Amino acid sequence: MLVELSLVLVLSLGIWTVRAQAADEELVADQSADAIGIKVLPNPDHNSPYAWYMRNAPNQATPSTLIVDGYEAVRDGRTVYVSAANISPSDAVDNGKLYTNIYAISYNQEPDLGTTDIFGQLLNFWKFNVTLVERSGNGVCLPETLTSCTDNSSCAAGAVCDEGQCKRYCLLSSDCLANQYCDSAKAKLVRDVKRMADLHEINLALQKYQREKKTYPVLAAGTYLPGRSVSVWPSWKEALSKELAIKVPVDPVNRLGACPGYDPVTCWNEQNKRFAADFSANDVLPAGSLAYAYQWLKSEKAMQLCTVYETNYEGLVEDNRCGVVKLSEDDKVPQIVFKEALSQTEGPFTGYFRINAFYDVKNEGIVIEPVSPSDWSDWQGWNFGSRGALTQSATSDPKVKKISAPLVDLPADQPYAEFSFRVTVRDVKGNSNSSISKIKICNPRTCADNACGQMQDNCGGTLVCGACDDGQSCDQINNVCRDKGDSGESPSQ
């Protein structure tokens, strides 16, 4: 069910006409009852406007496609649906949180001619991400032409002479030549929105294929490498599209990075049958690529579908980022590992544990609580200082944490004591995990003057106190040396 993020914004339209009276002109306002409404609807799955329309719009027809401020849109009669990004906070250039919304703008039935004209003007001049553009400015069209110049007249129309080179500045790729794309922050954001929409549709087709055939596309033939395809390879539009029975979209830039010694478009070397990257977790595509990649993972009975994002906003679909390790939900939960047994003699206490977390641990995301005894004040023999509890602190290794207390001093008649505590870790994505560990503190035994033999040292080890003098034997029960006659034993014993 769709939930509107904002109320419908209704624009009351005043249609202005000009009436000529003699030599003077007078503007007269004819108030129209027409209205233009805007709805902002959430798009959490990052659907393209066409896909969103086909899944959600009422009274569907055959919509036409258009572009509104660089973003894809569809029009059905009096309504236009635009899929655009919103960045929070609004002034973030590369580290805010990205949301995609569907902006539906429409006007009433039987409108005045002026209303339809205003509607068209609104579409032409509608601007998204205004603050981002104000902060980041224009980009340059890539690849650059590398044409030398002395002034603007030396450059093609629309280009300017900048430091002896003709450059074409841009806000959107539509400002560039047909074989170029714009590298502005706005253009990168627009392309990443399309990438999420594209891969969402491809992934739906792959999941449908898997449900029906109990496997993902194997691509045994028709591609450079069995089980693999890249959006710049012929197999992407041929073999993969045929298997999925859809027209598989390609990346909005669809170029691979530099690959000397390979075909510059496909990065494939036909002579040695090699690709310029190895499809590993850290090397799916050549560096600098902007393309889509698919591979069938036979051993895992799984697949990888990925892209290279140009922005780094929180909210991008990380599972579709090339190079991101694919983890199960269990693997994403922080793991707490105690480096060694927490056992020591009396004195200052120090212990360590390690946090293995896929995502960063939140500030103040580590909590230590007593378990047995359940209150720090009941931990007999412990001096926690002013903190009143075990203290957690950082080490030179950011994953390793230190726990400490100034002093533990057990009563003299207590050989050892055990205490347990719980560590809870929460990461920035809300994943959390807990682990309970024990601390054993011992009051170590020492060898008295008359001690002998082996005995427990109260700390889990064995204390060796040596042999007795001649004429003595070791009382193994009490671990003391006795004269042989005192023990009641015969000399042979």
Image (spheres, rainbow, N blue to C red):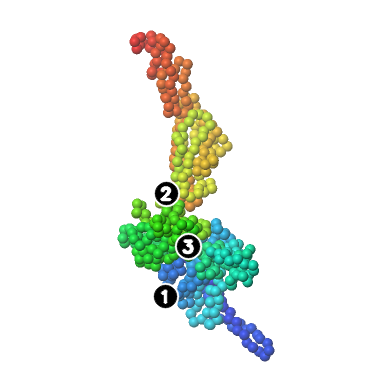
Q: Residues within 10 Å of mark 3 (few under 14, many from 20)?
A: some
Identify the residue position indicated by label 1 in the image: 62
Mark 3 vs mark 2: in front: 3
Question: Earlier along the polypeptide chain: callout 1 or callout 2?
Answer: 1
| Disc 1/disc 2 C-alpha distance (Å) | 44 Å
Residue position marked by numbered label 2 in the rendering: 331
**What kind of element bears circle 1?**
loop
Along the line of sight, which residue is nearer the eye, 320 or 487?
A: 320
Q: Position of residue 462 (x, y in %)?
A: 42, 25
Helix, strand, or loop for circle 2? loop
Residue 32 visible in the current orientation: yes
Residue 424 in view, yes or no? no
Q: CA distance from mark 1 to mark 3?
A: 32 Å
* Amino acid carrying mark 1 in the image: Thr
Amino acid at pointer 3: Arg
Q: Position of residue 321 (x, y in %)?
A: 46, 57
Residue found at the very far right of the displayed protein: 23
**Left or right, residue 450 beside residue 207:** right
